[in-house]
Amino acid sequence: MPQIIVLPHAELCPDGAVLEADAGISICDVLLTNDIDIEHACEKSCACTTCHVIVREGFNSLAPSDELEDDMLDKAWGLEPNSRLSCQAIMTNQNLVIEIPKYTVNMVKEGH
């Protein structure tokens, strides 16, 4: 069974985590199932960037992002070449190491 190694994040996962993950499940769903409350303001419909993660290891094991995800990622804070929206990145049988960025852009929260 593949694993996701989550690097420490001051608010969401201060000590980091090693999570068991089934192939075919999104990174976002694996995080949420394991009580890592990553934001997902659009309810995982690829309409925001709040679930943005940086895949530090295992990036090439993921299916390539599509044009819609790429367009959304262009709006993400801290975008890197190995960035993905965790709601769109589906686990394979390979382990991943991910980093959740320190900040996120949430138009709904920040616009009030």
Image (cartoon, helix red, strand yellow):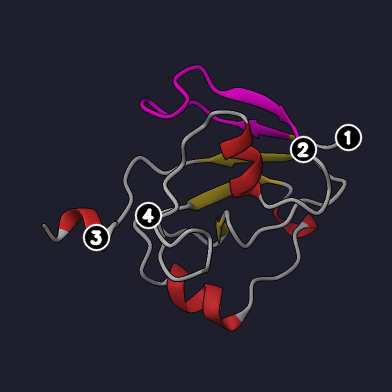
Residue at image mark 2: 21
Q: Counting residues from the N terminus, which is met first, the one under dot 3 or under dot 1?
A: 1
Are the residues flagged by discs 1 and 2 in contact, CB closer than 8 Å?
Answer: yes
Q: Work out how far the residue at label 1 is from the one at label 4, CA to CA, in angstroms.
A: 30 Å
In the rendered image of this protein, does residue 64 appear above or below residue 29?
A: below
Eye-nearest disc, 1 or 4: 1
- Residue pictured at 63% horizontal, 78% vertical: 66
- Residue pictured at 42% horizontal, 60% vertical: 79
Q: Work out how far the residue at label 4 is from the one at label 2, CA to CA, in angstroms.
A: 26 Å
Q: Magenta: predominant secondary structure element?
A: loop
Amino acid at pointer 2: Ala
Amino acid at pointer 1: Met
Disc assigned to residue 32: none
Which residues make up the magenta segment? Answer: 4-21
Residue at image mark 1: 1
Disc assigned to residue 108: 3
Q: Is residue 105 left or right of residue 41?
A: left
Disc 1 secondary structure class: loop
Q: Residues within 10 Å of mark 2 (few under 14, many from 20)?
A: many
